[in-house]
Image (tube, helix red, strand yellow):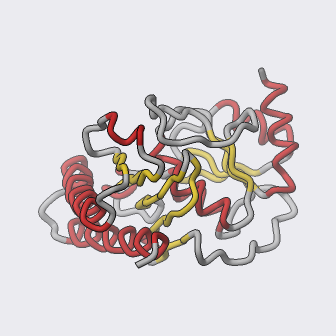
Amino acid sequence: MTDADLAAHLAKVAGDILLTVRGSAMFDGKALGKAGDETANQFLVHALRHQRPDDGLLSEESKDTSERLAKERVWIVDPVDGTREYGEARTDWAVHVALCIGGRPEIGAVALPGLGAVLRTDAPAPLLPAAGKPRMVVSRTRPAAEAVSVAEAIGAELVGMGSAGAKAMAVVRGEAEIYLHTGGQYEWDSAAPAAVALAHGLHASRIDGSPLIYNQADVYMPDLLICRPELADRVLAEVAALS
């Protein structure tokens, strides 16, 4: 099984597991989110350690170790990206499985179980035509001030949405043109979405335009820009003007 096939398979199966847990009617609210996280994480970690025993591994739901730092190939996973949305039975949550090689997000898959979709790096679809007025996806509960300011400057429409993966895949799927995030994230929040976005021909970077580099000792990665390539320079210029 290729790395891309493995990433897509694991993301899909983890999503199915999460739907089963949610449909069991044994949990609700925060307890449901905790149960889903733990169950999906156990599956992903065990599967990756069995299928790729020589690779490094970083998961949001597992204790991190320094062992991965010496590895060229490191899997970075988020068993449930958007725990609140998952617990509320919304569709804007995701499962992230990425393989970073030399720190770069090379291979990955993002499952959107609520939509029955898996987007993967080895099967990019052509980008749909952009909307005349750019649409910028932001947090549905706490839009970042920087994103709101940039949207006003470029005349973009704000679209509230849940998880980071759902927002990034909205750009991939042609439902939005820009995802600008400045509110704080970690490597597992963006590794798989960035890999998929780049494979589909989108721009993906830090908000200063620098490349996304993963498998760092400090996994905090507070900002992210995923957007249509023709909009990247303008968005980056507006972000720079804010500072």
Please give left or right for residue 115 compared with residue 226 in the image: left
Towards the viewer: 160 or 72: 72
State which quarter of the image contains the N terminus: bottom left
Quarter occupied by the C terminus: top right
**Residue at the extreme left of the image, as rendered:** 26
* Residue 122 sits in quarter: bottom right
- For the residue pair 186 and 105, the one nearer the viewer reads as 105
Q: Residue at x 51, y 57 (%)?
A: 192
**Which image quadrant is residue 85 in?**
bottom left
Residue 207 percent coordinates (x, y): 71, 36
Expressed as whole percent of the image width and height from the top left, the position of residue 226 reads: 68, 51
116 horizontally vs 129: left or right: left
Residue 111: x and y in percent read 45, 68
Q: Is residue 8 left or right of residue 125?
A: left
In percent of width and height, residue 227 lies at 73, 54
Q: How many marks?
A: 0
Q: Quadrant of residue 43?
A: bottom left
Residue at 26 percent across and 53 percent down: it is 37
Q: Residue, x 52% and y 32% (percent of image)?
A: 184
Q: Is residue 207 above or below residue 5?
A: above
Q: Residue at x 35, y 63 (%)?
A: 89
